[in-house]
Structure formats: structure tokens, C-alpha cells
Image (cartoon, helix red, strand yellow):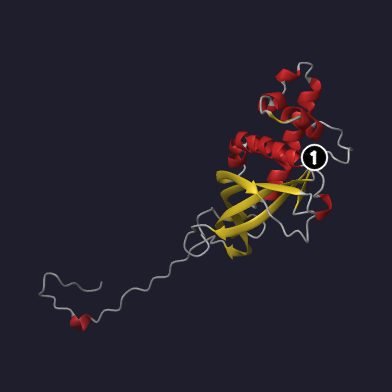
Amino acid sequence: MLIIPEVIFIKTLKAILKIVRDDFNNNIDKTKSILYRIANGSGALERYDFYTQLQKVLITDLDDPRAFDFVLGFNMNKVAVPTLHITLPSETSAPNGIGIDEGFAAEIFDDTTQAYRKVYTRRFNTTYQFVLTSNNSNEVIALYHFLRALDISLINHFELSGLQHIVISGGDVNINPALVPPNVFIRSISLNFAYEIEVQDLFTTDFVTSLIFAMNPPIIDETQVDESDSNSWTLP
């Protein structure tokens, strides 16, 4: 099975953020909403209340130009608005079996060609970063802590999706000011994990359908046999 972490992250984020929005909008009592349970009591910086501001970022109409969005790769055109950029800083080979782990996964039988197709296995250690950007530093801080909380609650989901032994970390990111405007604030959540992929061989191996055994009797020189020897014998 080919595991693509980017697909898992995008589908999961779309689904969970829709659940958070719908749950908040459909709850008359907002204290029973998911957003309230996660973000309420997170405090404030001067007049910036994180729970209140997260409502403006996450619950706003999706057509709003400042509505929270996420993209694959680092998109320079969206750094000034609340955006999550999913990037892959590094990926290395994890401990693997001899060769290409042939035989670790069962071969696949092709009924049409009556042949087996080998399956190879590789394991990787990888780091993905959820890079948060905005021209409002408080938005970045609020989104960072909210999304990190969501990632913690989604660890079991990620594990069942094939992303194993997830370790979450994070921090501020400094990017070349020649590339990013000076009023843009950046922080990232790092997800370190291992995952395994199975790849079918491009060619098939012939399937053995029958075995034919050919045996030739031994040729014995009768003149060499001593009939007086009780352990000797002669051909009939």
C-alpha cells in the first residue's frame, strides 16, 4: 500500500475543521462546542482574547479573504493571511530488512497470468512541518496552540492511518527577509514519525503448476558383487 502523508493530513484537516465549524454554528450553547472546550480559558494578551479571536479565524465564512486555509508546500502568495503550509523538511531511510524486504509482505497472485508478483517493503523516518503564517502575530500564536491540541487528539487516527510513533514539537521559524515581508509572523508544528510502504514488483514470477520427477535406476556391475557376502545383493 502506498501511504502519502500529505493526503492523510489534508483530508484529516478538512474534515476536522468542518466538524469544528459545524459544531460551533449548530450549538446554541457555545460552551458545549468543541472550540470552547479546547480554547476557552486560554487567556488573553492585552485586549486579544484567544478564544474570541479563534472564532473570527476559524468560524468565519470560507469566502472571507482572511478565512483560515491550508496548502501543500510553502505558498508565498498566502503568507500574509492565516494559512497552514504543509512542508516536508526531511525524510530518511529507517531500519529495513536485507535487500528490499522481499517476502516480508505476501506475494500477490495474478489470476490472469497465473503468476506471482513480488511485494517490496521500505520504511522511512520523516518530519513534516505545519507552518503557520499571518501578518498578525497573535493569530499565529492562537492557531499554533489550537492546531497542536488537535494534533494530539488525532494521534490515534494518524496511527491507524499508518503514521507510527508520532512525536510533536514546534517553534518559531526565521525565513530570509528578502523572501518574506518583515511584517509576516511564522511558527511551525513539527510531526516526526515513521511509516512503511509496500510496492509491487513491475514484473511477475511464473507460478509452478506441476512438478515432474525423472529418476534413472543405478547401473551396477554384477561382476563386482560378492554373493558370499550376506550384505551384498544382485539385480533380479
Q: Which residue is mark 1?
A: 68
Give left or right: position of 47 versus 41. right
Q: Counting other residues with Cα less than 10 Å from the Cα at mark 1, is it few (<14), some (14-19), or many (20 or more)?
A: many
Relative to 65, say whether 95 is above or below.
Answer: below
Q: Quadrant of the C terminus?
A: bottom left
Residue pictured at 19% horizontal, 72% vertical: 233
Q: Is residue 25 above or below residue 109?
A: above
Q: Is residue 1 visible?
A: no
Placement of 234 over or under 205, stated as above or below: below
Q: Quadrant of residue 109?
A: bottom right
Residue 90 shown left or right of residue 140 in the figure: left
Which of 136/194 is in front?
A: 136
| Element at label 1 | loop
Between 225 and 157, the one nearer to me in the picture? 157
Q: Position of residue 40 (x, y in %)?
A: 69, 25
Q: Which residue of the protein is positioned furthest toward the top in this rendering?
A: 29
Q: Position of residue 100 (x, y in %)?
A: 53, 63
Residue sitting at x 13%, y 75%: 227
Horizontally, residue 122 falls left or right of residue 225, namely: right
* Residue at left offset 62%, top offset 33%: 153
